[in-house]
Amino acid sequence: MLKWPGQVVLAGCSTYWAIDVTAALEKKNLRELYDNNILPQLNDLRELVNKKISKIGRMTLSALIVIEVHARDVITKMLEENVENVNDFEWISQLRYNIEKKKIRKLVLMETYFYCLSSNQLKKTTS
C-alpha cells in the first residue's frame, strides 16, 4: 500500500469497500463484514501508523485512516438502522466507487428524493 500513489490507494480501497458492502447486503451478512473485515483492517492501519514510514507514506496512511473510519461509521449507522437491502436509502445515498469496464467511477444518487406532506402522509417521490 505504501508503494502506490495516495490517490490510487484511496480509490482502490474505496472501490473494494463499496463492492464488499454491496455483497454483504446481498448476502444479509453486513454484521459479519463489519466484525471480520472492517474492524480488523482498522486495527492493521493503527499498527502500521506506529511504524517508521516515509513522510509521503504517512500522508497516504493518514488520509486512508480518515476514509476507513468514515466507512466504519457508515456501516455502524446502517447496522443501527437495520439496512438489509442494496436499495435501502441509507446505502444508495452514499457516495461510492465502482468498477465499470476496468475503470473506477464514482456513483452518486441519480434520483432526487422529495418528501412532501400530503393528506397527513409522508410520501417519497423521485424525479
Image: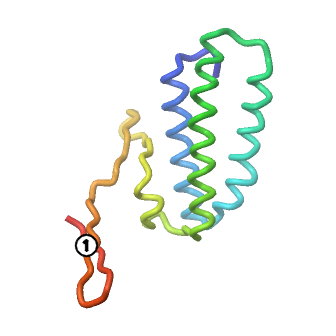
In the rendered image, residue 115, in percent from the top left (x then y), is placed at: 29, 72
The residue nearer to you, when weighing 44 against 123, is 123
Residue sitting farthest toward the top: 54
Residue 66 placement: quadrant: top right
Q: Identify the residue at horizontal 63%, vertical 15% (top origin).
A: 57
Per the image, label 1 sits on a secondary structure element best described as strand
In the shown orientation, is residue 4 left or right of residue 118? right
Q: In this rendering, is residue 112 above or below 53?
A: below
- Counting every numbered tag in the picture gives 1
Residue 23 placement: quadrant: bottom right
Q: Identify the residue at horizontal 76%, vertical 25% (top origin).
A: 48
Residue sitting farthest toward the left: 127
The quadrant of the picture occupied by the C terminus is bottom left
Residue 25 placement: quadrant: bottom right
Q: Identify the residue at horizontal 57%, vertical 69% (top origin).
A: 81
The quadrant of the picture occupied by the N terminus is top right
In the rendered image, residue 13, in percent from the top left (x then y), is placed at: 56, 35
Residue sitting farthest toward the bottom: 119
In the shown orientation, is residue 27 left or right of residue 36? left
Q: Identify the residue at horizontal 52%, vertical 38% (top origin).
A: 14
Q: What is the three-letter code of the residue carrying label 1?
A: Thr
- Please say which color scheme the image uses: rainbow
Q: In this rendering, is residue 55 above or below 67?
A: above
- How packed mark 1 is, by other alpha carbons closer than 10 Å (few <14, some 14-19, many 20 or more), is few
The residue nearer to you, when weighing 6 against 63, is 63
In the shown orientation, is residue 74 left or right of residue 92? right
Dot 1 corresponds to which residue? 125
In the shown orientation, is residue 93 left or right of residue 33? left
In the rendered image, residue 44, in percent from the top left (x then y), is placed at: 76, 33
In the rendered image, residue 41, in percent from the top left (x then y), is placed at: 72, 39
